[in-house]
Image (cartoon, rainbow, N blue to C red):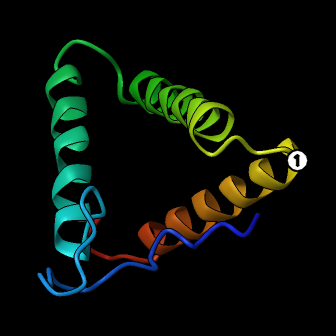
Amino acid sequence: MKFPPWHQRPDEFDPETHREGILDSQSFLRVADQFISLANQRNKKIESTELQMVMLYAAARYAAHVGKNVLNIEEQEDFVQHMVAQYTDMLREHMADPTV
């Protein structure tokens, strides 16, 4: 199974090509910001380094659920390597961002 890269999505909402449940770039960032907002709220009582690991754990657990139960992947290692590559790409992008 070929897995798409995380950034392969429409730049803007287009009603002609829109598929229900698929996020365009702006919606993708809005949903991500909701998770970041929750982390910032929890950061008032929980250290950032702890929250970082909690979010990473939750992302891994949810990815495993999607891989096993939604995509029904046969080769787990291919999916794991894809997800590792996606995280690496995202992390490098944010580390290079001077606004972070």
Going by the image, does 70 lie left or right of 39?
Answer: right
Which of the 4 quarters of the picture holds residue 25? Answer: bottom left
**Quick one: quadrant of the N terminus?**
bottom right
Going by the image, does 65 lie left or right of 28?
Answer: right
- The residue under label 1 is 75
Residue 66, position as x, y percentages in the image: 56, 38
Along the line of sight, the residue nearer the viewer: 41 or 98: 41
In this view, which residue lies farthest toward the front? Answer: 16
Along the line of sight, the residue nearer the viewer: 42 or 82: 82
Regarding mark 1 in the picture, which secondary structure is present there?
loop
Residue 65, position as x, y percentages in the image: 58, 29
Residue 60, position as x, y percentages in the image: 59, 34
Residue 99, position as x, y percentages in the image: 24, 72
Q: How many marks?
A: 1
Residue at coordinates 65% horizontally, 41% vertically from top-left?
67
Along the line of sight, the residue nearer the viewer: 66 or 72: 72
Along the line of sight, the residue nearer the viewer: 92 or 4: 4
Q: From what the image shows, is residue 85 above or below residue 54?
A: below
**Quick one: quadrant of the C terminus?**
bottom left
Which of the 4 quarters of the picture holds residue 26? Answer: bottom left
Which of the 4 quarters of the picture holds residue 84? Answer: bottom right
Q: From what the image shows, is residue 99 above or below residue 34?
A: below
Residue at coordinates 36% horizontally, 30% vertically from top-left?
48
Residue at coordinates 25% horizontally, 84% vertically from top-left?
17
Residue at coordinates 64% horizontally, 33% vertically from top-left?
64
> Mark 1 is on which residue type?
Glu
Going by the image, does 40 lie left or right of 97?
Answer: left
Q: From what the image shows, is residue 24 above or below residue 58?
A: below
Q: For label 1, count other residues whose C-alpha is less than 10 Å away and answer few (under 14), some (14-19) or many (20+).
A: few
